Structure formats: structure tokens, C-alpha cells
């Protein structure tokens, strides 16, 4: 998930080959103004763009340079970066979605940040793995996000139901809250990344694995999600709902609970009469850890041609370090409803923004979609999405759907990873 505005999670682009081919043709770096540095991001929306420029200006002053912010729509950032690489005009810093970082790193397109003096000592394990590929730290995140279980506090209170913490509690609560035109739970079960992103907590918290989709734990996770639909607690329309659609249903009172992320805050806040709260995604059994996907962007320093300017790279790294200090993380997260990655900033955020404190816990145990499969995530995502759609539409049993999904992954990758 992007840290800007309310963009949905994007599928990892299959760009590694394109990046590699582009970089092969790169020669000498184009002449640059030594006093102007460019940072490319997807912060096109206001007030995010203005907030970013303010902190970039402050960091530029600290480094003794001017900073130009180049913002492009999220789905155009990678193609734009490829075009710039082919003309030796890459920006000094690129804010990459976590799902795209491994492919740029694999292609040799990023400078390891530790080589430029950035330390990993004060990073949480999830933040370190989020910005790393094959054990090398390439991207510094300013904030991250994940998903949780939102619930209508008035509806649950009236029904005498406590926020569910386990799968069984959720099953019972969702059934009891389903009444008339209201379903107990709203989810996205699209076969695309929206649905896959929402399925991952059920898979991972149950011990399932994207590398073993036909394992008993993985199959059981899909069986559980499918059962919520088949017992009537979830609308059959969830196979067509984006995460934004789920939020709309929750606001309209058509779902008493929903799975969603903090990027929905701007819309929820437009409805002050709606009383809501959030808890972590329920787990199979009490005491289990809720493991959800980690979303966001990370600041990276790209390799800009064969004739690299090492001094310029070091100044770029200074900008990255300044943009991601604990203070900067806290300020940005408070404004944008995300979670700081520095443990001390996250704890302060918990105290200052108690309504979103559950996301601090959720993020602490969350992991990147690409952590285990790297550049192969897109293949796994497509297989999971196909299985999810098949099981929820009834065209296949959860077991058969997952067996086929694993076969799809094996065929694409040449065997199990």
C-alpha cells in the first residue's frame, strides 16, 4: 500500500527485465546542476505534495542544496523511471513502492544504503526487511501501513458484542450482526491485488505460505474465508468489491465490520456521525500472532549510469536520512494516518493517535509481500487471486483451488522455491 492518500495496494510490476535492459544501455550520466537534487515520488495529491515539499526544503537546507520534487501518479512512476534511465536522467532519490523495490535491486538499479553511510541499527525487523532485497538494505521507509478490522462501535455495542479477536469469535459476531440489508463483515475478494492483500492475514496468521499454497494451513485459511460467505455473513458481491467499495459499504451501514487500511481515513472522517474503531485482524486461536501485509514506500538512491557521481550519491543519502528521522516519521504518519517505522516514533504515535494504535501492533508483526518470494511475487499473487475467486464463487472447493494455484506457481517458476 502506498503511503500517499488512499491508493489501493498495487501488484508488483513485472519490470526486472525491462530495468536490466534499460540499465545495460546507460552510459555517462547527463550533466546536472550540482546544487539541485530531484526526488521522485507518487505524492501528486494535496495536501501530501505540499507536506512533502516542506520537509524536502528543510532537508535540502540542512544538506546545503535545493530539492525539486517530481511527483507522478503511482501507476506511472516505474515507467517514468525506466524512461529517465534510458536517457541518463534518473532523479537522485526515488520513493519506490515496496513491491517494486526488489525488481529494481535485482536488476542492479539501486545503491545499497549502508554503502552510503545509512545505519540499520534503529530499524524494526519489519522495516528492515521491507526495504531490503536478499539481505541488502536498499530502501528507507518513512512510514508503513497494513490492514485491520474496523467495526461500527454503535452497532456492536447495541448487539452486546465485543470486537472479535479470534476466527471463531469473528464467525459468531459476523453471523449475529447480519440482519436485513446489513452483513456482518465486508471484505474485498477480488482476484486482483485488492483481494489478495486482504486474504494474506488469514493465510499467514494460520501458518500458510505463498510458497506452499496447497499446504493444510493454506487450504484451511481459504476454507475459513469462503465459509463466511457461504453462511451468509459476507455479501456475495465481495468478489467484485475493491477496498474502496468495502469502505463505502461500511459507511452506508451495509456492513457492521470491515477489513481495510488507514488509507480510508480521509473518507471515514467525512462522516463524523459514524462511530468506528479498529482492532488487529482476528487470529485462528487466542495467543496466535496476527500477520498482515506491510505496505508503503521506501526512499532509494538509484544507480545513475556507469559514470556514477559518488559524491552526489552521498548527498542523496543525506536527504534520505533526513526525510526518515524518527521526528520526520512521526510528523508524516500523524498527518497521513500511517505508522512510523522507528520503534520510538511508533510508541509516541501510539500515545498521540490512540484511535490508530492497533495498526502499530499490526505493523510490528506484518511483513512485505515480496519478503519470501522477491521478484516472483506477481506470479504468486495471480495464483492466490484466482484461487480466492474460485472458492468464493463456488467454481472450486478451497482445496482444489489451492492445489491448482500451487500448480500454477510451479509451472511459472519451474518448481517450488
Image (cartoon, helix red, strand yellow):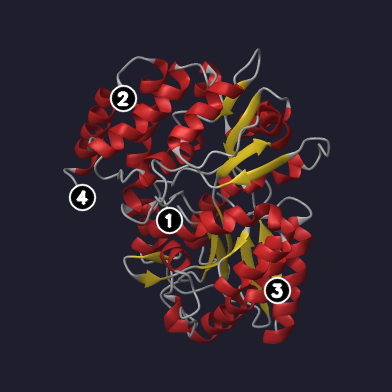
Tags 1 and 4 in contact by the CB under 8 Å rule? no
Q: CA distance from mark 3 to mark 2?
A: 52 Å
- Give the label on residue 19, or none: none
In the rendering, at what x and y percent does residue 346 appear? 60, 67
Would residue 22 be seen by someone viewing this image from the given angle? no
Badge 1 crowding class, 10 Å Cα cut-off, few under 14, some 14 to 19, many 20 or more, is many
Closer to the observer: label 3 or label 1? 1
Q: Looking at the image, which is closer to me, 248 or 19?
A: 248
Q: Return the disc, 4 or 2, that comes first in the chain's sequence.
A: 2
In the rendering, at what x and y percent does residue 362 appear? 52, 54
Closer to the observer: label 4 or label 3? 4
Mark 1, residue position: 367
Q: Return the disc, 2 or 1, that comes first in the chain's sequence.
A: 1
Badge 3 crowding class, 10 Å Cα cut-off, few under 14, some 14 to 19, many 20 or more, is many
In the rendering, at what x and y percent does residue 99 appear? 45, 52
- Give the label on residue 398, or none: 2
Left or right side of 92 for 5: right
Mark 3, residue position: 67
The relative height of residue 404 versus residue 97 in the rendered view (above or below) is above
Question: Which secondary structure lies at badge 3?
Answer: strand
Q: CA distance from mark 1 to mark 4?
A: 18 Å
Question: Which residue extends farthest top?
Answer: 180
Badge 4 crowding class, 10 Å Cα cut-off, few under 14, some 14 to 19, many 20 or more, is few
Mark 4, residue position: 417
Question: Which secondary structure lies at badge 2?
Answer: helix
Q: CA distance from mark 4 to mark 2?
A: 22 Å
Amino acid at each position: 500500500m502506498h503511503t500517499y492518500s488512499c491508493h489501493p495496494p498495487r501488484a508488483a510490476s513485472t519490470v526486472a527485465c525491462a530495468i536490466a535492459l534499460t540499465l545495460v544501455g546507460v552510459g555517462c550520466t547527463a550533466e546536472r546542476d550540482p546544487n539541485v537534487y530531484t526526488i521522485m515520488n507518487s505524492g501528486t495529491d494535496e495536501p501530501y505534495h505540499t507536506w512533502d515539499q516542506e520537509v524536502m526544503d528543510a532537508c535540502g537546507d540542512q544538506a546545503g542544496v535545493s530539492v525539486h520534487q517530481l511527483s507522478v501518479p503511482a501507476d506511472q512512476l516505474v515507467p517514468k523511471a525506466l524512461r529517465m534511465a534510458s536517457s541518463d536522467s534518473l532523479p537522485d532519490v526515488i520513493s519506490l513502492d515496496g513491491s517494486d523495490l526488489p525488481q529494481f535491486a535485482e536488476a542492479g538499479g539501486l545503491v545499497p544504503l549502508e554503502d552510503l553511510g545509512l545505519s540499520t541499527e534503529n530499524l524494526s525487523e519489519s522495516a528492515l526487511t521491507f526495504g531490503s532485497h536478499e539481505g541488502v538494505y536498499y530502501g528507507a521507509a518513512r512510514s508503513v501501513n497494513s490492514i485491520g478490522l474496523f467495526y461500527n462501535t454503535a452497532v456492536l455495542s447495541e448487539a452486546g458484542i465485543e470486537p472479535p479477536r479470534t476466527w471463531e469469535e469473528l464467525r459468531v459476531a459476523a453471523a449475529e450482526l447480519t440482519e436485513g440489508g446489513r452483513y456482518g463483515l465486508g471484505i474485498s475478494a477480488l482476484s486482483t491485488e485488492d483481494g489478495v492483500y486482504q486474504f494474506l492475514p488469514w493465510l499467514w496468521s494460520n501458518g500458510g505460505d505463498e510458497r506452499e499454497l496447497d499446504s493444510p494451513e493454506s487450504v484451511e485459511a481459504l476454507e475459513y474465508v469462503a465459509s463466511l460467505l457461504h453462511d451468509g455473513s459476507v455479501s456475495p458481491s465481495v468478489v467484485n468489491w475493491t477496498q474502496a467499495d468495502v469502505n463505502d459499504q461500511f459507511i452506508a451501514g451495509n456492513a457492521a465490520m470491515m477489513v481495510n487500511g488507514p488509507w480510508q481515513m480521509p473518507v471515514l472522517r467525512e462522516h463524523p456521525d459514524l462511530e468506528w474503531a479498529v482492532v488487529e485482524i482476528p487470529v485462528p486461536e487466542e495467543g496466535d500472532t496476527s500477520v498482515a501485509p506491510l505496505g508503503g514506500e521506501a526512499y532509494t538512491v538509484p544507480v545513475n549510469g556507469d559514470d556514477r557521481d559518488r559524491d552526489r550519491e552521498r548527498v542523496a543519502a543525506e536527504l534520505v536520512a533526513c526525510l526518515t528521522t524518527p521526528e520526520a516519521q512521526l510528523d508524516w504518519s500523524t498527518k497521513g494516518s500511517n505508522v512510523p517505522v522507528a520503534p520510538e516514533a511508533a510508541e509516541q504515535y501510539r500515545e498521540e493517535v490512540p484511535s490508530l494504535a492497533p495498526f502499530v501492533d499490526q505493523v510490528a508483526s506484518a511483513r512485505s509481500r515480496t519478503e519470501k518470494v522477491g521478484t516472483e511475487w506477481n506470479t504468486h499473487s495471480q495464483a492466490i487471486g484466482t484461487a480466492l475467486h474460485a472458492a468464493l464463487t463456488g467454481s472450486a472447493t478451497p482445496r482444489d483451488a489451492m492445489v491448482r494455484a500451487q500448480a500454477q506457481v510451479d509451472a511459472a517458476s519451474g518448481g517450488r522455491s
